[in-house]
Image: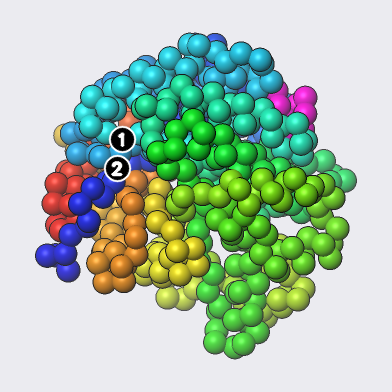
Amino acid sequence: MSEMKFPDGFLWGGAVAAHQLEGGWQDGGKGVSVADVMTVGSNTTPREITDGVIPGKNYPNHEAIDFYHHYKEDVKLFAEMGFKCFRTSIAWTRIFPQGDEQEPNEEGLKFYDDLFDECHKYGIEPVITLAHFEMPYHLVEEYGGFANRKVIDFFVKFATTCFKRYKNKVKYWMTFNEIDNQSSFNNEFMMTTNSGLIFSKDTNNEAAMYQAAHYELVASALAIKEARKINPDFEIGCMINYTPVYPKTSAPKDILLAQRVDQRRNWFSDVHVFGEYPKETEAYIERNGYRSDITEEDKVILSEGVVDYVGFSYYQSMTVSADKIDADHLVDPSDVIAKNDYLEVSDWGWPIDPIGLRYSLNLLTDRYHLPLFIVENGLGAFDKVESNGEIHDDYRIDYLRAHLEEVKKAVVLDHVDLMGYTPWGCIDLVSAGTGQMDKRYGFIYVDKNDEGVGTMERSRKDSFYWYKKVIESNGADL
Ligand code: BGP
């Protein structure tokens, strides 16, 4: 394998999201986002979504790693590793602080101009997600988030403002980060960050999700249609959290259940790519009366605003068993998860499955016939700083190497059309799921702990030098 390389022009880089690293939550006219009202949780305690900001609570996104003030230093470190691209998001609340203003906030727009210029200085191509888990909190309070059709227009305005402003600085875009996470419709954190839904006791979460997701998909398609007019050279993708679903055994009822779980979780990208709902999803929604508002015009918009590529994150696979619930009685996919006896798990219980990534690359290629982009992959782990300041994160190198070996096979042997690879959290940042700092993914260590204490100093881990070598050799030397 070592003689095999990735194609020329392969986009090696790293990925982050604005709310997880920028900090500066009230700087430059920024408004409050849903991420700014979330407290720290843990593996077992979900993050709390507060009603506004409560003094004295720990809100890790407020300061994060203060990339807002450190971005020059950080981009320089990315350049030192040889990044060809850098995936981040634009904080919606820097551009439209409340979400429903007529005019954008110039200071917010200027920040991203400066950031993109800084990237280009080193030949680093920005790869931009528009909505990565952080809509303006005002849109949640005032309109109910994407439960309200009006929010489509606010998103499209935000997207169009960005397309116009950065049309000569950004070529690669994605509309909504991990839009499919909403299939975990009983997880309030997922629902609030994705579509701005806050549940009450009487809400049917699943029904609310199908309606809100429909509005988001329409918003995405409308934004794409506008983008094509602004710059026909843009490449615009969707972004899903792809988790392949395995049956626990070869019993046909397990196989059928695995397929059904996949249908419940992975239909979002079908709409993005094909411009229409898949049959089984349509049937399920109709049978349950879960989506009352879909117009003929919506259907036309969906069919016209399809994506150019499929961006996805890959962290783990999922194994399911029909022992208690079979395919015809499935409601919440998380009720049928079973242990996979062949896989180790991370410190946070996520199954580690490099071969699952090759499988996913082939499966998505067969399903969509579009270029793919791995825009997240990585291991959240505790790191130890040695007394001499070094950080020996061989576990992270092992994880990434094993995954890249499989990616290389998919590209070189299976001819998967892969645009690039941007491992998640290339610099340590706030974990989305837990709000913790100590769940680290980075090649670059940031001195800050879960309590918010630290110097913020950046240092290179062993994985920094490893990844630099990977990029230098275009993947020949893993
Ligand atoms: C994805 C998100 C990221 C990110 C990552 C790791 O779901 O797109 O924002 O944080 O997962 O998850 P976590 O931070 O919970 O470890």
- The percent position of residue 39, horizontal first and vertical second, equals 60, 32
What type is the residue that disc 1 sits on? Answer: Glu
* Residue 96 in view in this figure: yes
What type is the residue that disc 2 sits on? Answer: Gly
Q: Label 2 vs label 1: CA separation? A: 9 Å
In this picture, is 62 found above or below 268? above
Residue identifier under label 2: 13
Of labels 2 and 1, the one closer to you: 1
- The percent position of residue 196, horizontal first and vertical second, equals 69, 36
The residue that appears at 14% across and 57% down in the rendered structure is 477
Left or right of 422 on screen, residue 102: right
The residue that appears at 69% across and 30% down in the rendered structure is 153
Magenta stretch: includes residue 386: no
Q: Quadrant of the C terminus?
A: bottom left
Disc 1 on helix, strand or loop? strand
What's the magenta region?
136-145
- The percent position of residue 46, horizontal first and vertical second, equals 62, 44
- The percent position of residue 383, horizontal first and vertical second, equals 32, 43
Please identify the quarter of the rendering in which residue 461 is found.
top left
Residue identifier under label 1: 125
Dots 2, 1 in contact, CB < 8 A: yes
* Residue 449 in view in this figure: no
